[in-house]
Image (spheres, rainbow, N blue to C red):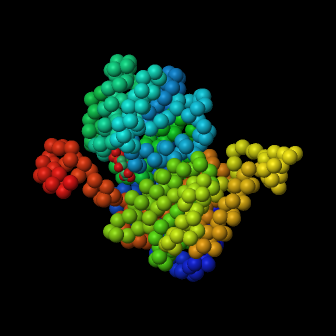
Amino acid sequence: MKLDIQKVTGFIPQEKIFAREGEALSHIKALYKKTGKGNDFLGWVKLPSSIGDGEFTAVEDVAHFYRDNDVEIVVVIGIGGSYLGAKATLEALSDNFWQMKKREHPKVIFAGQNISEDYLYELLDLLETRKYGIVVISKSGTTTEPAVAFRLLKAHLEGKIGKAKAKDRIVAVTDAKRGALHTLAVQEGYRTFVIPDDVGGRYSVLTPVGLLPIAVAGFDIRQLVQGAADMQKATAPEVAFADNPAAVYAATRIELYKAGKTTEILAGYHPKLLYVTEWWKQLYGESEGKENKGIFPAGVTLTADLHSMGQYIQEGLRNIFETVISVERTAHKLRIPKDAENLDTLNFLADKRIDEVNKMAELGTMLAHVDGGVPNIRIEIPAINEYNLGTLFYFFEIACGISGYLLGVNPFDQPGVEAYKKNMFALLDKPGFEEESKKVKARL
Ligand code: PA5
């Protein structure tokens, strides 16, 4: 992975970014020594290098079980950090049209990330005729969205194949001791994986939360973790600031923020990366957006969004900067054919790779946006594969920790998420919310 901040230095001098060196490096030390804010949630920092063969094998066993038993679909139930890492990886690594193609491994689909009645109805309708399994993921074990989805799917599966067989097809990923899901899993005898106490949801992609669905879908979790472990080394406390991409990225974005660039747009040129952006948005939004501070994380998929958001990026409010994930090599090669009649006037592109056109769009867009007042950070990965996704995940996580500390917030809590839950429970007359219920209803 390469980080390039050349197209930022026209907006803020490189010296200003490098003046953050001492601070950034001390924050990395704080993450390692657990001396900063949120220090009870730092289990992810050394996680990649500490995952052992036994942990991989346990996860791979479940993947083999589903595959060997011809399970066609595995529904992964989870929300937020208990969903986005797996979703991002599966979308990035799968064929763009995987839903319509045959797969050697079970198709992994998601539920519990919304409370849409139509979504759940249509899901049950699909599952009616399919052989399926369920992986239910919730660290707290009490989150409403996945709990509702699991109640529906559990009842459906038990109704379809009986409680005993259903039990074998259900796997729970949750806290070691607490929460309703833990209690339920113990009582029902489900195979269970533990989310470590000191790893928060949005930093949990390299725990069974991410690894299990990724392995079930047939992808190489060892390579994913290897990529993350190599990035752990590349961003360790002893690495010099200039050589540490996470420290430089964090310092750059904080300097841009101080200069009024309060929105960061993560841009990708491959639709497969859409959910990597969604994962990144959650990571940064939930980690930094507090105490009336934080860079607003937005995302675009280009070139599609150049025909929608492109106008705003080029000429709208000048409070934005852009971070581009650039992919050096595509998985496939395809050239534009020559056409004898050239009625579409495209023969100037004949014999060129589609990716060359995409790359020129990328470079042209970067220059246009820089000219329009949008600083540009470029992150280049060699290809979209397990290893490089692992490097990206860890890079963004450690950079987020540093960046959150540079901002002065606790990047590992999410107190603001509770506000909607309180109102929703009050509106739904949950026992214990009687007083709130009266107050909230009076406000509607
Ligand atoms: O990052 C986080 O901590 C959150 O997004 C959680 O992952 C999300 O709220 C789901 O929580 P849980 O896994 O407890 O159901």
- At horizontal 58% and vertical 62% (from top left) the residue drawn is 310
Image side of residue 330 versus residue 137, left or right: right
How far across and how far down the image is residue 68, in percent? Answer: 53, 23
- Between 141 and 151, the one nearer to me in the picture: 151
385 horizontally vs 57: left or right: right
Q: Where residue 87 sits: x, y (%)?
A: 49, 44
Q: Is residue 189 visible?
A: no
Label count reads 0
Q: Quadrant of residue 166?
A: top left
Quarter of the view holding residue 331: top right
- The quadrant the C terminus occupies is bottom left
Q: Residue at x 33, y 31 (%)?
A: 152
Q: Is residue 269 above or below residue 207?
A: below
Give the residue at the far front of this rendering: 343
Q: Quadrant of the N terminus?
A: bottom right
- Residue 433 located left or right of residue 292: left
Instruction: Give whichever of 35, 426 is nearer the camera.
Output: 426
Question: Residue 396 in the image: x percent, y percent?
Answer: 51, 59
Q: Is residue 88 above or below residue 261?
A: above
In the rendered view, tell whether residue 122 sits above or below residue 352: above
Please report the residue visible at 48 percent of the width from the left and 60 percent of the height from the top. Answer: 298
Q: Residue at x 87, y 45 (%)?
A: 340
In the rendered image, the residue lying farthest to the right is 340
Q: Is residue 20 left or right of residue 335?
A: left
The image position of residue 437, as x and y in percent, is 16, 50
Q: As rendered, which of 379 and 28 lies closer to the eye?
A: 379
Residue 108 seen in the current view? yes
Q: Is residue 3 above or below residue 224?
A: below
